Amino acid sequence: MIRAILCSAVAVLCLGLTSFDADAKYTPTTQESPAQKAARLRWWSDARFGLFIHWGLYSVPAGEWNGRTGMAEWFMDETMMPLAQYERFAAQFNPTQYDPDAWVRIAKDAGMKYIVITSKHHEGFAMWDTQATDYNIAKRTPYGKGVLKPLAEAARRAGLHFGTYYSIMDWHHPSQHGAQQNHRNPTLMHPELKAQYVAEMKAELKELIEQTDTEILWFDGEWVNWWTVADGQDMVRYLRALKPDIVINNRVAYLRNDMEGMDRGTPVGDFGTPEQQIPPAGFGPDVYWESCMTLNDHWGYSRADQNWKSPQDVVRNLIDIASKGGNYLLNVGPTAQGRIPEAAVERLDATGRWMRVNGESIYATQASPFAHALPWGRATQKSGRLYLHVFDWPADGKLHVPLRNTVAHAHLLAAPDTPLKTGRDANGVVLELPAQAPDAVASVIALDVSGPVVPLPEAQ
Ligand code: H79
């Protein structure tokens, strides 16, 4: 379900080329206990909200070619432009307006705690100054230098964490110039060149750790038939030896099941990666996941794409995800000049205004104790405190919460000095609310309760 529904036609092709290994045994890559994993991932799961950035040569054509629009980072696959022609976009990549501190400020003002940027997308172009390939930003563009290290440094200056996306599939690499007809995805591997390619990947990833101290490796393009689960496990061992506390997503190995391993506790990698969707429910306390989503309809910059999510969509998605115990990685596609589109900045600003009032109901929280969706909104919790996110404000001013606990104190995060009156009826707690919602998108109530939260049976 996670990504197969997005591209089912291609999926058939992809799976057709694959040796299906549903019975593969996933041998653990570390002896880590669940408590040790929780400690290693603490900063990441407390963060809840991050910025994804897709930036590469595809930002130059901006999704447009010969009158065709609506493409982005898959431009090279969708146009089937010859390699030599695509390479020439490098001569036009000159992001003179790139200001890493300004990008970090946009993320921080939105309430985000980490950034994940494409170091190399499927196009195979490296966005840092690398010795491992000459197909890189420092060598091939008029800009003449890498863009990742400055962003990593700006992020740390602002107290944000920094991570890097890396595509296993590479449409440009000689090892993968296969016999595809109408698409470059999925690549076919020349078997005699695989070891050299994997060595090159490892050299690049080592550089990313050395140059940027990347805290997350966010793999993608792992569905190619030549990348085995054993290759993914070997990669995890390699990276952990270089940086033991690094956080790695589950796309380091393609698990070929609908939930991408989340229902099995992500046997390879640390966290699940539902793409462009929010799972219907959480997966329990020891399963880590992050929904990644676009802010319009594309990941890379796509000039014609103005189908932006509203601030309400963004804020409610973030709440919905937090209420299920996940993270939200929200994407922007900067221009080849180095600007994050204004429409994206406006929406992130609006999200930040909501987060400044209500952030404590998101950061370092746990999933809702209520297994069933609440009719009026969502909930999160942390020790002794329950947060209620009210999407639909009750017309009669009474909010019903299916809770057995006694409420010691209740207030709106938008009005911390005004306690709310609480009562009970047969269905649990009843809160008396002011006539008007303080926030039309989502108003948050903090309930202080004693002992563990006990939902009434009908809400369990
Ligand atoms: O980087 C962004 C996109 O460019 C990339 N992932 C995000 C983060 C992306 N690549 N592909 N897709 C998104 C959707 C396509 C999925 C498919 Fe497949 C790849 C269909 C067939 C191959 C994976 C394997 C899903 C089904 C089979």
Image: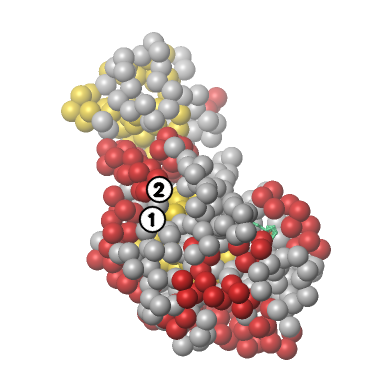
Q: Quadrant of residue 76?
A: bottom right
Q: Answer whether residue 67 is visible to the viewer in this image.
A: yes
Frontmost residue, 98 versus 373: 98
Q: CA distance from mark 2 to mark 1?
A: 7 Å
Q: Which residue is mark 1?
A: 340
- Percent from the top left, x then y, of residue 100? 31, 65
Vertical arrangement, residue 106 with respect to residue 314, above or below: below
Q: Residue reaching furthest top?
A: 396
Is there CB contact under 8 Å for labels 2 and 1? Answer: yes
Using a 10 Å C-alpha cutoff, classify the residue at mark 1 as few (fewer than 14 neighbours), some (14 to 19) or many (20 or more).
some
Q: Residue at x 33, y 40 (%)?
A: 350
Q: Which residue is mark 2?
A: 344
Q: Secondary structure at mark 1?
A: loop
Which corner quadrant of the figure contains ligand 1?
bottom right
Tell me if 258 is positioned left or right of 435 in this view: right
Vertical arrangement, residue 352 with respect to residue 130, above or below: above
Q: Residue at x 68, y 67 (%)?
A: 80
- Percent from the top left, x then y, of residue 456? 49, 26
- CB at mark 2 closer than 8 A to ligand 1? no
Amino acid under label 1? Ile
Q: Residue at x 49, y 44 (%)?
A: 306
Using a 10 Å C-alpha cutoff, classify the residue at mark 2 as few (fewer than 14 neighbours), some (14 to 19) or many (20 or more).
many
Q: Residue reaching furthest right?
A: 16
- Percent from the top left, x then y, of residue 294? 50, 50
Q: Answer whether residue 29 is visible to the viewer in this image.
A: no
Tell me if 103 is positioned left or right of 93 in this view: left
Tell me if 283 is positioned left or right of 107 in this view: right
Q: Residue reaching furthest left?
A: 417
By what rule are the colours in the image chosen?
secondary structure
